[in-house]
Amino acid sequence: MAIENGEKLEGGSAFVAVTKPTDWTIVILRVVAFLATASATVVMALNKETKSLVVATIGTTPVRATLTAKFQHNPANVFFVIANGMASLHNLSMIIVHFFGDKFNKDKALRLVMVAILDMMTVSLASSGDGAATFMAQLGKNGNSHARWNKICDKFHKFCDQGGGALIASYVGLLLLLVITQIEIETMAAVAAGPDHLFNLRNNFYLGAYQAAINNSELPNLSPDDAVERDCLVFRSYIALGSYQLVINEIDASAATPLQAVKLLALYLSGPDYRESVISSLKELLADPGIGNNPILRLIAGTVFMHEQDYNEALKHTNAGGTMELNALNIQIFLKMHRSDYAERQLRVMQQVDEDHTLTQLANAWLNLAVGGSKIQEAYLIFQDFSEKSQVTSLILNGKAVCCMHMGNFDEAESLLVEALTKASISDAKDPETLANLVVCYLHLGKSPSRFLSQLKLGHPDHVLVKRAAAAEEGFDRAIQSVA
């Protein structure tokens, strides 16, 4: 599938590092913390030094004794080894949970809480072990004259140095665990901050219910950022319905950067005369260090450059991800490039963020359609699930129809596509994807697709199917002329 008319998804074409930004940060921090605490455990557990020391003098003859310093001789060091060993096991377990937790527990919120609690318990355990070992290290280095405890580090240099190295490694691991715990707590706070007021609006937009998105966009008590995102979704819905001029007229020069980007998309899609100036304006905005990294701006740039079939330039602005929409657009671009392997990697990133997200499910269906074979049935079930739980839209019906055509069920595909035409709003009555899929379906059924192809040529002369049909006609005419 590809993003067309602002975000509209076509059912039959091929498609294309947060993700939460903290996801890979936490993994890297956990790996380093694991290495630090594991090193501290091993170094302290292997800490042993044997020396021959003068313990007395008889006359002028020194009396020597062979003494051994071991970590086991000190309960504090034993506790240190146990604490750091458990911290290492905890970090290793959390790394495994990060990658495979979804297979065993689908409740992400519960998993997030449990991980945070275990992190705090591990911090407490590790800090206790470090504190006890640090006290004994200070005692071994300086002794205690009041208690008449002699220092030993002047005699067992290697033992003390090795123990000090273990302490340093352990404190590094403890510091990283504190940072990880802070990130986890902030993530929980963000999740618990309150309801997502734009959830339904986004879902309507993602699933092609553009008029519903527009009709239900009056949402109270939005923050300034949410209000801008709301306006972007509404104007992109108008773009998807073909109301380009309305968007161009409504967004003025004082609007926020995301809205300016949406206006440029409307200009780009309104006609070929504006495309060169739109691309120039986009590049100028993207080059501005103050606003160039705006997610909506990058999303619009990726959409425009994908329309231009300049996939490398599109990925230059979208490949860093940052939002689910950017990740989904990456998948569409990769599938346009026939790189389903890269698309699959991007899908895994989305699944790690939120496997149940609407865009994750849609992207999974797109990838399954591109891969084909037994994956077609999985794609059909995804669209079927959407049709049962959400408003049935042209996008969902087209997705099911394309799956049916792949499976050879052209009669069912025809009925779905005819239903898609009847469900389309007045302004969207000539939905290009539905018309294009009907052309393909009718050809397989042995029916004449001329009516739908004519509508497609009149309403969407730049559609890929129209261009291919025109190229085929020109090739056929040349072939006739060559043998005439």
Image (cartoon, grey):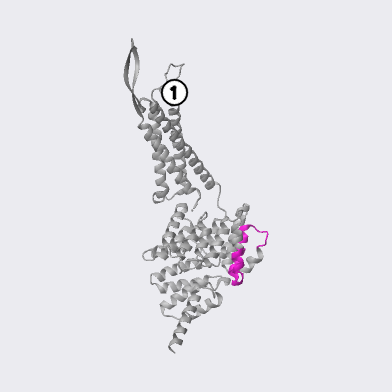
Could you say where residue 344 lies in the image, as x and y percent from the top left?
Answer: 42, 59
The secondary structure making up most of the magenta span is helix
Q: Is residue 401 above or below residue 362?
A: below
Could you say where residue 17 lies in the image, as x and y percent from the top left?
Answer: 48, 53
Could you say where residue 142 lies in the image, as x and y percent from the top left?
Answer: 45, 22
The C terminus: image quadrant: bottom left
Which residue position holds label 1?
A: 139
Single out the residue that lies furthest toward the front. Answer: 60
Does residue 455 belong to the magenta stretch? no
Q: Is residue 245 above or below residue 182?
A: below
Q: For this rendering, which residue is in front, 202 or 337?
A: 337
Tally of numbered discs: 1
* Location of residue 82 (image quadrant): top left
Q: For this rendering, which residue is in front, 33 or 212?
A: 33
The residue sitting at 43% across, 80% down in the picture is 447
Provide the secondary structure element on which disc 1 rests.
Answer: helix
* Location of residue 94 (image quadrant): top left
The amino acid at mark 1 is Leu
Does residue 268 belong to the magenta stretch? yes
The residue sitting at 58% across, 63% down in the picture is 236
Magenta span: 251-280
Q: Is residue 91 above or below residue 364?
A: above
